[in-house]
Amino acid sequence: MKISNTPNTSSTITGFILLGFSCSREGQILLFLLFSVVYLLTLMGNGSIICAVYWDQRLHTPMYIFLANFSFLEIWYVTSTVPNMLANFLSDTKVISFSGCFLQFYFFFSLGSTECFFLAIMAFDRYLAICRPLHYPTTMTGNLCTNLVVSCWVLGFFWHLIPIIIISQMSFCGSRTIDHFLCDPGPLLALTCKNTVVELVFSTLSLLPLVILFLFFMGSYTLILRAVLKVPSAAGKRKAFSTCGSHLAVVSLFYGSVLIMYGNLTSEHKAGTQKIVTLFYSVMTPLLNPVIYSLRNKDMKNALHKLLGI
C-alpha cells in the first residue's frame, strides 16, 4: 500500500497514527483505568449469561441459545477495539500498523454485521413464539436453531471481505493520522485519494445488510405488535411485551447509534461526534446488554442467582 504526497511521488505506508482521545497524560491514565473496568465488567456480564445458559437445563431453548451466542459475540466485539484502545492510552507514539489497522477494521465490522444478523434471527424467534405459538416447537427445531446460528457467523464474516479489500487497495494521500480511537471507515476514507466510485461501492456494500436486516426487524415487530394487541387479557399482553422488551431495547440502542454513524458514510461528522457515537455502540452497548436481558427476564435472573450462589 502506498501513501502519495503528490501525484508523481509516493512512499510506503508502515502504519497509521490513532489520535484517540486528546487530553493530558493524567487524563489518559484515568481513561485507561475507566475503560479497563468497563472492559472487565463487559466480559464478566456476558460471560455470566453464557455460563447460566450452559449450566441451567431450563435455558436450553432456542431463545437462550441465541442469547448465549449473542453474548459470546459481544465479548469478541468489544475485544476487537478496547485492548488496542487501552494500549493507545499508555503509548507515546499511538501508532498502529497498516495490517493491524485493517485487521481491526475487518473484525470490528464483521462482528458488527454478525450482531445485526443475530438481532434479526432473535426477532424471527420472537415472531414465531408469539404469532405462531402452536407451530413454534415444530418450526424452531434444534437443527434450524443450529443452522441459523452458523449462518449468522458465516454471513457476518464473509460480507465485509469485499469492502475491506476495496479500501485496502486504495491510495492514501498525505496524512496518515486518524482522528479516532479505532480504524473506522469514515476517517480512513477521508485519508484516501478521492475516488467517488470506490466510496459509493464501499458505502453500498456496508449499508445493504444493515438496511435489509433493519427492515426485516421492523416487519417482524409490526406483526408481533399486531398479534399482542389481539390478546384479550392484560396479563397476556404484559407477558408478551416483557418477552420482547429486552430485545427491542437492545436493537434500539444498537441500530439507533449505528444508523446515526453510518447512515451516510460519505457525509462528514465531527471527530468528537464520531468518537462518542462509536464508543456508545461498540463499548457501552455490550456492557449494558447483560443488564437489559437479565432485568426483565425472570428465568435468566433465577439462573444467574443460581450460578452466583445468591
Image: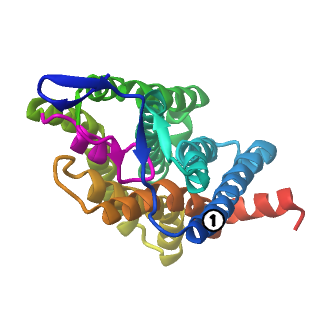
- Which quarter of the rendering shows the N terminus? top left
Res. 67 in view: no
Q: Is residue 146 left or right of residue 6?
A: right
Depth check: give the residue in front, 235 or 232: 235
Mark 1 lies on residue: 29
Res. 201 in view: yes
Would you place residue 73 above or below residue 309 in this image? above
Q: Say which residue appears at 40% left-offset and 64% top-offset.
A: 276
Look at label 1 and name its amino acid: Ile
Magenta residues? 174-194
Residue 90 in which image quadrant: bottom right
- Which quarter of the rendering shows the C terminus? bottom right
Q: Say which residue appears at 34% left-offset and 28% top-offset.
A: 164
The location of residue 296, given as percent across then percent down, is 60, 69
The location of residue 200, given as percent across then percent down, is 14, 35
Q: SS for tag 1?
A: helix
Q: Is residue 192 magenta?
A: yes
Protein image colouring: rainbow
Depth check: give the residue in front, 173 or 106: 173
Q: Is residue 195 left or right of residue 69?
A: left
Depth check: give the residue in front, 223 or 214: 214
The location of residue 27, given as percent across then percent down, is 56, 70
